[in-house]
Image (cartoon, rainbow, N blue to C red):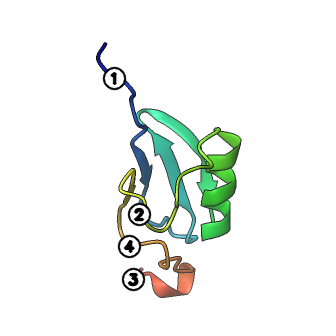
Amino acid sequence: MENTTQYPHIVVHPPALDGSRRVTEGDLTLGIASHLDDVVEILRLADLDRIEVEESELIEWQGGGPDDWPGLSEHDI
């Protein structure tokens, strides 16, 4: 019997002007994060809390990694 376990592809999108980052799984928006702890909570609520947020290959960090949470003043306007 073939193992057909599918793993989610989580994307933490680039920061918006307010520093928040959208978290998605495929076409589904799981939530909006303003801090790394928010990403952890969003994944917990989606029953994906076994993912190591900062180190998992299942998470694609766009526009910066888990330590990049710029505020409005850090963006070029």
Label pair 2/4, CB-CB below 8 angstroms: yes
**Mark pair 1, 4: CA separation:** 33 Å
Amino acid marked by disc 2? Pro
**Mark pair 2, 4: CA separation:** 7 Å
Q: What's the residue at 48%, 68% (across, down)?
A: 54
Q: What's the residue at 54%, 86% (across, down)?
A: 73
Q: Which residue is label 3 attached to? A: 76
Q: Which residue is label 4 attached to? A: 64
Q: Tell me the quarter of the image containing the C terminus.
A: bottom left
Q: Residue furthest top?
A: 1
N-term-proximal mark, 2 vs 4: 2
N-term-proximal mark, 3 vs 1: 1
Amino acid marked by disc 1? Asn
Q: What's the residue at 52%, 60% (across, down)?
A: 52
The nearer-to-camera label among 2 and 4 is 4
Q: Secondary structure at mark 3?
A: loop
Q: Is residue 13 above or below residue 43?
A: below
In the image, 74 versus 6, the foreground residue is 6
Q: Is residue 74 above or below residue 9?
A: below
Amino acid marked by disc 3? Asp
The nearer-to-camera label among 4 and 3 is 4
Query: How busy is the neighbourhood of tag 1: few (under 14 within 10 Å), some, or many (20 plus)?
Result: few
N-term-proximal mark, 1 vs 2: 1
N-term-proximal mark, 4 vs 3: 4
Q: Which residue is label 2 attached to? A: 14
Q: Secondary structure at mark 4?
A: loop
Query: How busy is the neighbourhood of tag 3: few (under 14 within 10 Å), some, or many (20 plus)?
Result: few
In the image, 4 versus 32, the foreground residue is 4
Amino acid marked by disc 4? Gly
**Mark pair 4, 3: CA separation:** 15 Å
Residue 3 tag number:
1
The nearer-to-camera label among 1 and 4 is 1
